[in-house]
Image (spheres, rainbow, N blue to C red):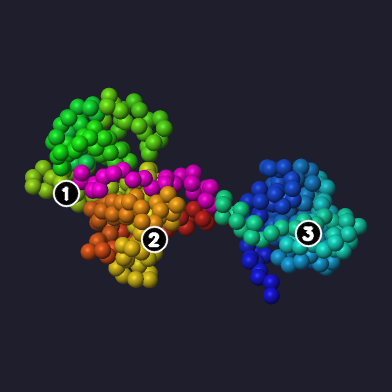
């Protein structure tokens, strides 16, 4: 039995929305096809796809089965009916049949009748479509990044120092009050890690140094760090008492706000959202979500399956660090080795799911 991988409507939708895939099938120059209509009503039926190729109007009859002579009759009839309309008056009409397979006999009959035939592979069409989806999302998605900082609250000392104005990285590294825990063998390296986390959460900036993108920004000993507008608001909410090294509710709201407004701002914001979504997806099968399940699922979802290899420190760090960030802002709860979605976490995901749905509708 033949395994039909897609129905005709699916293939038609893909070719209509992505003429570049149709161009590959018809072996014409990239950008040369323009969709002008689909499912156009004629006396004997509906055309599948109508493309303009220069001054030629291509009447494409699409099939998900082997081409037969009756398909030639069908598209030939459409050509005759369109020939008498104002719509096609200025164009040369070219009927074609596009099918997974075309026998030699049908191909010969088609040539005699002035009809071109083309073969396509449904799996290749679907793969090309899915690749375009990946290419489209990669334009704005940022791959999850690890900073070497296990808690959001570790940057509080740095942010507090920046309330006095821009500070030189080298000077900050020499100030032990910047760090929650002292005794770092390489304080300059630790300071840069804290700074990168602050930058990727839109809390810290490097004045005069914006080239290269948020995630690839390099920080030197001579650079100055400053608070962003969001960083100023975050710092205003610091608990300068005994809970200085804890994320307050107001600070959590500011971080969650960034996840709402700019989820792809950096590899940190995107990584947080991806882990949150992973907890939600895995919770459909078991609650709480087990850490070992996240260790298997999250790297694949993040596109890091090979880079964060099984058993690697980076894979465990990714789960622990992103999980801690999400716990600190209250969108997940972590009890022992179990992860739970919270109401605010579900609201954040629902917001983005609705947003994605709107974009999908707009693209059709």
Count of labels in the image:
3
State which quadrant residue 110 falls in: bottom right
Q: Which residue is labeled 1 in the image?
A: 246
Q: Position of residue 45 (x, y in %)?
A: 76, 66
Element at badge 3? Answer: strand
Between circles 2 and 3, the one closer to the viewer is 2
Left or right side of 208 for 88: right
Residue 2, image x and y in percent?
A: 69, 72
The disc at residue 97 is 3
Region in magenta: 133-154
Task: Tell me the residue at 83%/47% (across/down).
Answer: 92
The quarter of the image holding the C terminus is bottom right
Q: Is residue 3 visible?
A: yes
Mark 1: few/some/many CA within 10 Å (<14, 14-19, 20+): some
Expressed as whole percent of the image width and height from the top left, the position of residue 284 reads: 38, 69
Q: Nearer the viewer, mark 1 or mark 3?
A: 1
Measure the C-alpha gap from mark 1 to mark 2: 30 Å
Q: Residue at x 70, y 48 (%)?
A: 23
| For residue 320, above or below residue 3 | above
Q: Which residue is mark 2?
A: 296
In the rendered structure, are the residues bearing label 2 and label 3 in contact, judged by CB atoms less than 8 Å apart? no
Q: Residue at x 64, y 60 (%)?
A: 123
Decide which of tag 2 and tag 3 comes sooner along the chain: 3
């Amino acid at each position: 039995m033949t395994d039909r991988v897609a129905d005709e409507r699916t293939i038609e939708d893909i070719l209509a929305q992505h003429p570049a895939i149709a161009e590959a099938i018809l072996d014409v120059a990239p950008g040369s096809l323009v969709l002008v209509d689909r499912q156009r009503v004629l006396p004997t039926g509906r055309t599948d796809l109508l493309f303009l190729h220069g001054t030629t109007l291509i009447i494409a009859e699409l099939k998900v089965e082997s081409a037969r002579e009756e398909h030639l009759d069908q598209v030939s009839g459409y050509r005759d009916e369109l020939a008498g309309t104002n719509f096609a008056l200025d164009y040369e009409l070219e009927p074609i049949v596009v099918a997974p397979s075309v026998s030699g006999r049908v191909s010969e009959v088609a040539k005699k009748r002035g009809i071109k035939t083309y073969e396509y592979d449904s799996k290749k069409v679907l793969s090309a479509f899915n690749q375009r989806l990946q290419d489209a999302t990669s334009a704005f998605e940022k791959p999850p990044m690890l900073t070497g900082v296990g808690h959001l609250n570790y940057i509080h000392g740095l942010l507090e120092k920046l309330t006095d104005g821009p500070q030189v990285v080298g000077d900050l590294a020499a100030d032990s009050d910047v760090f929650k825990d002292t005794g770092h063998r390489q304080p300059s390296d630790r300071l840069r890690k804290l700074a990168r986390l602050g930058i990727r959460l839109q809390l810290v900036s490097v004045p005069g140094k914006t080239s290269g993108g948020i995630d690839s920004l390099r920080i030197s000993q001579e650079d100055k760090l400053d608070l962003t507008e969001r960083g100023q608001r975050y710092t205003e909410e610091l608990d300068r008492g005994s809970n200085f090294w804890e994320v307050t509710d107001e600070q959590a709201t500011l971080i969650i706000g960034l996840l709402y407004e700019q989820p792809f701002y950096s590899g940190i914001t995107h990584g947080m959202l991806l882990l949150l979504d992973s907890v939600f997806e895995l919770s459909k099968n078991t609650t709480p979500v087990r850490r070992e399940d996240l260790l298997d699922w999250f790297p694949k979802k993040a596109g890091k399956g090979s880079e964060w290899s099984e058993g690697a420190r980076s894979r465990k760090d990714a789960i622990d660090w992103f999980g801690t960030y999400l716990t600190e802002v209250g969108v997940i709860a972590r009890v022992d080795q179990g992860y739970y979605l919270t109401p605010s976490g579900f609201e954040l995901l629902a917001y983005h799911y609705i947003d994605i749905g709107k974009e999908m509708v707009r693209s059709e």
